[in-house]
Amino acid sequence: MPTGQSTPPPRGAGKFAAIAAVIVAMIIVVTFVGMNMQHAQTAKEQEAGQVKPADAPMTEKDLGKLPAKPN
C-alpha cells in the first residue's frame, strides 16, 4: 500500500523537457521566418509594375505631369 510518498521522476526527464521546448521554439521561429519571407516575396510581386504613390495621379484629370504654362 502506498505511504503517500511520490516516486521521483525518471532520469533525464528534465533534459527531455528542455530538448522538447527547444524543438518547439525552433519550429515557431522557422515558421515565423518562413512566413515573413513568403510575405516579402508576395509583396514584391504585387509591387512590380505598379506606379509609385508619389508619381500617381491625384485627380481624374491629372496625368502625372506638370500643368502647361499659359501662353
Image: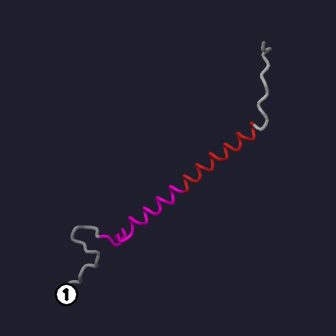
The secondary structure that most of the magenta stretch takes on is: helix
Between residue 43 and residue 8, name the one nearer to us.
8
Magenta region:
34-56
Between residue 22 and residue 54, name the one nearer to us.
22
Place of residue 71 in the rendered image (x, y in percent of width and height, measured from the top left): 19, 87
Q: Is residue 33 above or below residue 21?
A: below
Total number of numbered labels? Answer: 1
Residue in view at x 32 percent, y 70 percent: 56
Query: Is the image coloured rainbow, by chain, by secondary structure, or in one colour?
Result: secondary structure
Which quadrant of the rendered structure holds the N terminus? top right
Place of residue 59 in the rendered image (x, y in percent of width and height, measured from the top left): 25, 67
Image position of 43 (left or right of 9): left
Between residue 38 and residue 43, name the one nearer to us.
38
Between residue 8 and residue 58, name the one nearer to us.
8
Q: Is residue 21 above or below residue 10?
A: below
Label 1 Cα neighbours within 10 Å, binned few <14 / some 14-19 / many ≥20: few
Q: Is residue 15 above or below residue 57?
A: above
Place of residue 16 in the rendered image (x, y in percent of width and height, measured from the top left): 72, 40
Residue 52 is one of the magenta-drawn residues: yes
Image position of 2 (left or right of 71): right
Residue in view at x 78 percent, y 15 percent: 2
Residue 49 is one of the magenta-drawn residues: yes
- Kindly state the secondary structure of the residue where label 1 is placed: loop
Image position of 20 (left or right of 49): right
Image position of 52 (left or right of 25): left
Label 1 sits on residue:
71
Determine the residue located farthest toward the top in the rendered image: 1
Place of residue 32 in the rendered image (x, y in percent of width and height, measured from the top left): 54, 53
Amino acid type, mark 1 = Asn
